[in-house]
Amino acid sequence: MGGAEENSDIRQDPADDKPRQLQIISDERRNFIQQSLDAWCENQGYKDCNVNMLTFSHTLCISKNELSLFFDQCLHSNFRIWLSEIRFNAAKKMMLEYPDYSNDIISAECGFSCRTHLYRIFKNKAGCSPTEWRKSAKKE
């Protein structure tokens, strides 16, 4: 086996209880992946409500396994939680910039699949509904 093949994806059968080899992402790859994530956010890729880990990895041309490792090791999170945070911050920003936009518009523009998902994220992260968050943000 060549050197490049030794660093290929490690797949483990769930029934296999052998210890898994620890993989570490190099600083160079870490920086590349972070720059790719930043560019994707800058281009508002989060607005696509159908994005998932597989489509995301294809868009960035980074393996799903390597992205999972990056989220775990570098961001101490996972793709779903990271994407929710990105969309949550985009929604807050949009609410401040466009106070007349309805929650339905904010939800669609920020990539939430439905208004209910927007409400759930706000309750989880801010402890209140989007409407309550807007009111408190106006007072500050």
Image (cartoon, helix red, strand yellow):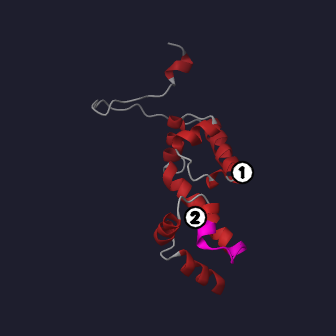
Q: Nearer the viewer, residue 63 or 52?
A: 52
Left or right of 42? Residue 26 is left
Type of the residue with mark 2: Phe
Q: Marks 2 and 1: CB-CB under 8 Å?
A: no
According to the picture, the residue beneath numbered tag 1 turns out to be 43
Using the image, tell me which numbered label, if any, was put on residue 88.
Answer: 2
**Residue type for callout 1:** Asn
Q: Nearer the viewer, residue 48 or 19?
A: 48
Q: Disc 2 on helix, strand or loop?
A: helix
Q: Residue at x 72, y 72 (%)?
A: 97
Q: Does the segment drawn in magenta span residue 40? A: no
| In this view, 111 is above or below 40 | below
Mark 1 lies on a secondary structure that is loop
Quadrant in the picture for the C terminus: bottom right
Residue furthest to the top in view is: 1
Location of residue 92 with respect to 26 vertically, above or below: below
Real-space Cα separation, disc 2 to disc 1, in angstroms: 16 Å
Residue 58 rendering spot, x and y as whole percentages: 60, 36
For this orientation, the residue located farthest to the bottom is: 139
| N-term-proximal mark, 2 vs 1 | 1
Query: Which residue lies at the image location 51% right of the left edge and 73% below the top edge?
Result: 126
Circle on res. 120: none
Which residue is at 37% across, 30% downward? 12
Residue at (57%, 39%) from the top-left corner?
Answer: 57
Residue range in magenta is 96-106
Q: Position of residue 138 (x, y in %)?
A: 65, 83
The picture places residue 132, in percent across and down from the top left corner, at 54, 81
